[in-house]
Image (spheres, grey):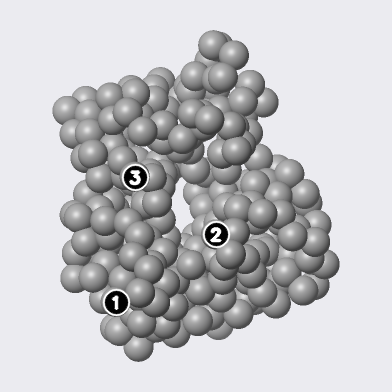
């Protein structure tokens, strides 16, 4: 039986503003990417999300971003690499502290939004993020865009990298994600998302915006928690994968390294 991880972005509420069906998604996901407060989330939301994930035995990751609450982290900001390293270190450390105080262990780090896409193509930003993770805890897993230069860079810096694909996003022919500024870039039809997830998990391919297929090797699949159709999409993706004998499980975190 083959296996793949199903991750969802969570903890993206802020104060009185509520977003996402986190409680229901935690019954479907095998790992959760928790917003760190820079694109969404606040201390209470982070702690509430962490405790719920622990209750459901879902692996917990930190989801750092550019400091962009107004733009939900979807705008590229001009940030020097050394400043970005500090920004990522600060955010991941905050979530890691709450996870530890709640009796858990942080599992992975996945960059959010514009930072995720920028680091996938800019080696300077990628290296800054990788160094921040390595400085904090070199045993954390790093979720990155499948096939991107950041995957190789992360491994070259000694991190365990998990390459990620998306059930609910459309792909350009070069393997990058279609901009969410383009209508239809986010897939909301559960059947279409499930078919794409199955292509990725079983056939290691994904359809592109130009009608072709490209090769893609991924260890984790993402469903966006802020997708209005996130719950039916995640449910159908899980059902489809399991009915095709694909096990849903989070990738193992490596054991602590000896001193």
Residue under label 2: 72
Q: Position of residue 113 (x, y in %)?
A: 57, 52
**Residue 242: image x %, image y %?**
20, 33
On the question of residue 110 being in view, the answer is yes
Does 68 sit above or below residue 223? below
Residue that appears at 29% across and 83% down? 103
Q: Are marks 2 and 1 in contact (CB under 8 Å)?
A: no
> Residues under labels 2 and 1: Cα distance?
20 Å
Q: Look at 42% across and 72% down and name the residue there.
A: 14
Look at the picture and state if 140 lies above or below 224. Answer: below
CA–CA distance in space, label 3 to label 1: 21 Å
Q: Earlier in the sequence, mark 2 or mark 1?
A: 1
- Residue shown at the point (70%, 50%) measured from the top left: 118
Q: Where is residue 114 shown, x and y percent of the image? A: 64, 52
Q: How many marks?
A: 3
Measured as percent of width and height from the top left, residue 225 is found at 37, 52
What residue is shown at x 50% (from left), y 81% (from top)? 94
Mark sitting on residue 228: 3
């Amino acid at each position: 039986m083959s296996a793949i991880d199903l991750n969802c972005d969570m903890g993206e509420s802020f104060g009185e503003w509520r977003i996402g069906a986190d409680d229901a998604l935690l019954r479907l996901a095998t790992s959760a990417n928790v917003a760190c407060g820079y694109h969404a989330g606040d201390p209470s939301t982070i702690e509430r999300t962490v405790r719920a994930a622990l209750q459901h035995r879902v692996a917990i990751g930190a989801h750092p971003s550019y400091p962009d609450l107004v733009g939900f982290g979807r705008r590229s900001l001009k940030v020097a690499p050394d400043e970005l390293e500090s920004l990522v270190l600060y955010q991941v450390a905050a979530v890691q502290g709450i996870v530890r105080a709640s009796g858990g262990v942080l599992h992975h780090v996945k960059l959010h939004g514009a930072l995720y896409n920028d680091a996938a193509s800019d080696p300077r930003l990628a290296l800054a993020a990788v160094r921040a993770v390595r400085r904090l805890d070199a045993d954390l897993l790093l979720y990155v865009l499948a096939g991107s230069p950041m995957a190789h860079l992360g491994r070259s810096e000694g991190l365990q990298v998990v390459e990620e694909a998306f059930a609910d996003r459309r792909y350009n022919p070069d393997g990058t994600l279609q901009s969410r500024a383009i209508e239809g870039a986010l897939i909301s039809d559960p059947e279409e998302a499930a078919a794409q997830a199955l292509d990725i998990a079983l056939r290691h391919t994904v359809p592109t915006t130009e009608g072709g297929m490209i090769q893609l090797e991924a260890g984790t699949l993402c469903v966006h928690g802020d997708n209005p159709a996130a719950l039916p999409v995640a449910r159908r993706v899980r059902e489809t994968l399991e009915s095709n004998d694909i096990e849903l499980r989070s990738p193992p975190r490596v054991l602590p390294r000896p001193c």
